[in-house]
Image: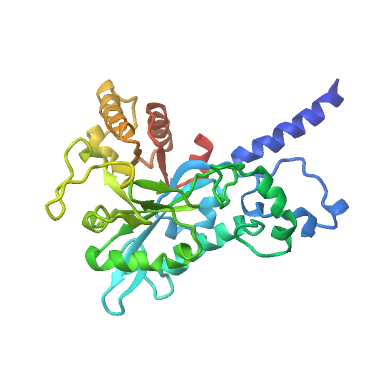
Amino acid sequence: MLWLAVPVLFFALVHASKLVHKAPTATLSYAPFGGKNASILRSPADWNRNTYPLFMHSHNDYERPVPVFEALAYGALSVESDVWLNPKDMQLYVGHDPFSLTAERTFHALTVQPLVEAIEQANTANAKYANNSQSSLFGDLQASVSTSSSPWWNGYFSLGVGNTQPLQLLVDVKNDANRSWPLIVKALDPLRKRGFLTRYEHGKVIPGPVIVIGTGGTPVDQLAPKGERDVFLDCELMQLSKPMPKIHGRQYEWNNTLCAIASTDFADVTSNYMGIHEPSEQVKQNLTGLIHEAHQRGIKTRFYDTPAWPIYARDRVNRMLLELGSDWINADDLESVAREF
């Protein structure tokens, strides 16, 4: 019965490739289709074909060999950009600190424009967005499967009609927040003009293919009072049980129309637990309490500065966070963390 094992093995390898991000051992020949680059083998989903989307956050994404696209290749639904305002030219640059900045490494070039290209690729045959031969040919067919809850856009990781899971961009404001933030909002125009940004309008969140979240020094008073905006806040997870400080004499609330996520330092919650040994019940209770507090408000959670080494300690902490119900996993080593999912 060995002949039965061959197709079964090939089937398993093909489907396993969606999880391990490697081509199956048994690969079909391209020859019958006219070669590897034949147009018949290309589709709008080429950039994410066989990639499984994960609630994984690409920490310090701008430091990767290929910012944004490398994270997407591993299925990460979230990327991060540390943004500095240079007072000499009033431009926005991206880097871990001022000593790592260069004139070329701008917020636009390393973060905004790659996201534009990724989402446009996903919508290249979308009749509601694009005007080309492919969208015209299949426009009626696309309309026939749309529903009242279907978005007009295709997400980068297409999960079928009605998929509304945006890519998440965390913008860490590193300096001069009050002057930086309006410039950051303005710098999002290439995404905004294409209708790609998730937005808030008078009590309602309208999903788009990208959701932008201010973290770090983002000024809360420039977000909370706005009745219309297309940026959100990374709120302090350990402060959700306390009233928000009043803004211009008015009381606002920590809720999911303002706080797209809530984050905190892992060590602060766990008394510097580093994953070397099994966590105590107190550590789990501390984490669970914060996660439940956020989820009751409809807010997703993220713990940063989780252990990166030893590897077994990192994996133990990540698995624990998933088991306890936390939503986002911080990742520096995208490949190995993706395997843990």
Viewer-nearest residue: 226 or 235: 226
Percent x, y of residue 62: 43, 60
Residue found at x 62% / y 44%: 146
Percent x, y of residue 94: 37, 65
Answer with the quarter of the image where residue 106 lies.
Answer: bottom left
Viewer-nearest residue: 212 or 204: 204
Residue lying at the far bottom of the rendered structure: 89
On screen, residue 258 above or below 62 = above
Percent x, y of residue 208: 48, 52
Answer with the quarter of the image where residue 69 lies.
Answer: bottom right
Q: Is residue 104 left or right of residue 293?
A: right
Residue lying at the far left of the rendered structure: 249
Q: Is residue 283 left or right of residue 63?
A: left
Count of numbered labels shown in the rendering: 0
Residue found at x 16% / y 46%: 251
The colouring scheme, among rainbow, by chain, secondary structure or one colour, is: rainbow
Answer with the quarter of the image where residue 260 lies.
Answer: top left
On screen, residue 87 above or below 18 = below
Residue found at x 50% / y 35%: 340
User: Which quarter of the figure is the N terminus placed in?
Assistant: top right
On screen, residue 255 above or below 250 = above
Residue found at x 67% / y 57%: 125
Percent x, y of residue 111: 45, 62
Q: Is residue 10 left or right of residue 194?
A: right
Q: Is residue 262 left or right of residue 115?
A: left
Viewer-nearest residue: 74 or 263: 263
